[in-house]
Amino acid sequence: MSALNQALRAALAARQPLLAELHAQATDCYRLFHGSQEGAAGLTVDRYGRQLLVQSFHRPLEREALQALIDIYQESFAGSLLPVYNDRSQGNSRIDRSDPVYAAEPAALGELVGHEWGLNYRVRARHAGQDPLLFLDLRNARGWIRRHSAGRSVLNLFAYTCGVGLCAAAGGARRVVNLDFAEGNLAVGRENAALNPQLPEMQFVQSDYFPAIRQLAGLPIAQRRGQRLPHYPRLAAERFDLVFLDPPAWARSAFGTVDLLRDYQSLLKPALLATAEGGTLVCCNNLAKVDAEDWREQVLRCASKSGRPVREAEWLAPAGDFPSRDARPPLKTLILHL
Ligand SMILES: C[S@@+](CC[C@H](N)C(=O)[O-])C[C@H]1O[C@@H](n2cnc3c(N)ncnc32)[C@H](O)[C@@H]1O
């Protein structure tokens, strides 16, 4: 057996108790192979409902290796999965998708639905963006939000496809606001809402983070000298009981730069000010090279300096389908009780 196949089988065996737990919780979206930690850096295998999503990040997977990989999971899931392979190593350039091993069946590329914590999520293997529509390492955070939203107002920042908002609504939040600047991502959030018609309505705000959070926090919007700012929606100042802040590693817009390595504070400070007295801010940093303890200190210092000291800070780790040999997972999540 090849070293890769051995690693895949070992990862599958190690996950059996977790998979039983997840299936019992009505979850069928999870990582089956986390290559960087399980013996094949740059390769991931995820299940999203019926879809089996294989992704390579460093180099394309040879067709024989891909076929052998698919066989392992089909054997384990009684042939029920629809495989899709996305090579992300060179902008999807090198794969000959006329080859049946690399091409996916039309059904695998259709509009599928995956489930997590009993909620339905849109699954689409290939779409305008690169990332899958649901980030699986955030599952525990979404579960936490669901358990702690009852009766609260919830602000979901950098909402992407609104999974966190959906969990807040399912957990009984009295108001849910999802904020993102990408209409395409919010459109999937709306699809996700429609796939769960039993949930109360959520609000979707399409706006750049910086003007939106500064207005909510009651702060002025800085204008660069001599430059007119693009249009942004006007929002009234408001403090939320529960705020979720999970930004991308880096992004630049006309209003500012998101930079999780050099400047977490300029994201965090207005989010703290938009959190109610006695409220909770859940914040994330997904950059592997940011040390958890350093980041925690920065976050606590920023909260004190902003006049919103943290009463208690709790770590929230990803589940066992994202193993971390050195106990330092890239995604760090801190729950700040103010
Ligand atoms: C990595 S995703 C965040 C994941 C998300 N929190 C979740 O629960 O899945 C990054 C999101 O940030 C959005 N984004 C990036 N820069 C932004 C900005 N300046 N203002 C608003 N949204 C931004 C992108 O459109 C994208 O949806």
Image (cartoon, rainbow, N blue to C red):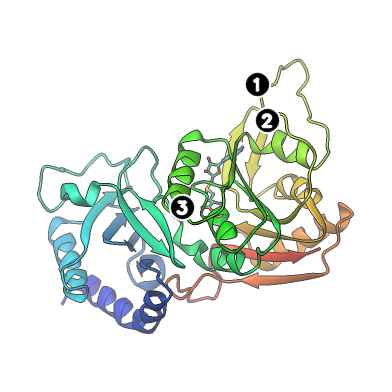
The front one of 208 and 39 is 208
Q: Is mark 2 within 8 Å of ligand 1?
A: yes
Q: Tell me the residue that label 2 is attached to.
A: 255
Q: In this view, does 22 lie above or below 236?
A: below
Residue 188 x/y as whole percent: 44, 43
Which label sits in the foreground, 2 or 3? 3
Q: Quadrant of ligand 1?
A: top right
- Mark carried by residue 197: 3
- Mark carried by residue 107: none
The N terminus appears in which quarter of the rendering? bottom left
Residue 314: name its quadrant: bottom right
The front one of 156 and 84 is 156
Q: Is residue 286 visible?
A: no
Q: Tell me the residue that label 1 is attached to.
A: 230
Residue 204 x/y as whole percent: 58, 40
The front one of 229 and 79 is 79
What residue do we see at 44% from left, 49% from top? 192
Residue 43 x/y as whole percent: 32, 61
Query: What amino acid is found at the position of numbered circle 1 in the picture?
Result: Pro
Of callouts 2 and 3, which one flags the residue occurring earlier in the amino acid sequence?
3
Of callouts 1 and 3, which one flags the residue occurring earlier in the amino acid sequence?
3
Residue 245 x/y as whole percent: 65, 53
Q: Check contact, mark 1 vs mark 3: CB within 8 A.
A: no
Q: Is residue 111 above or below residue 41?
A: above
Q: Check contact, mark 1 vs mark 2: CB within 8 A.
A: yes
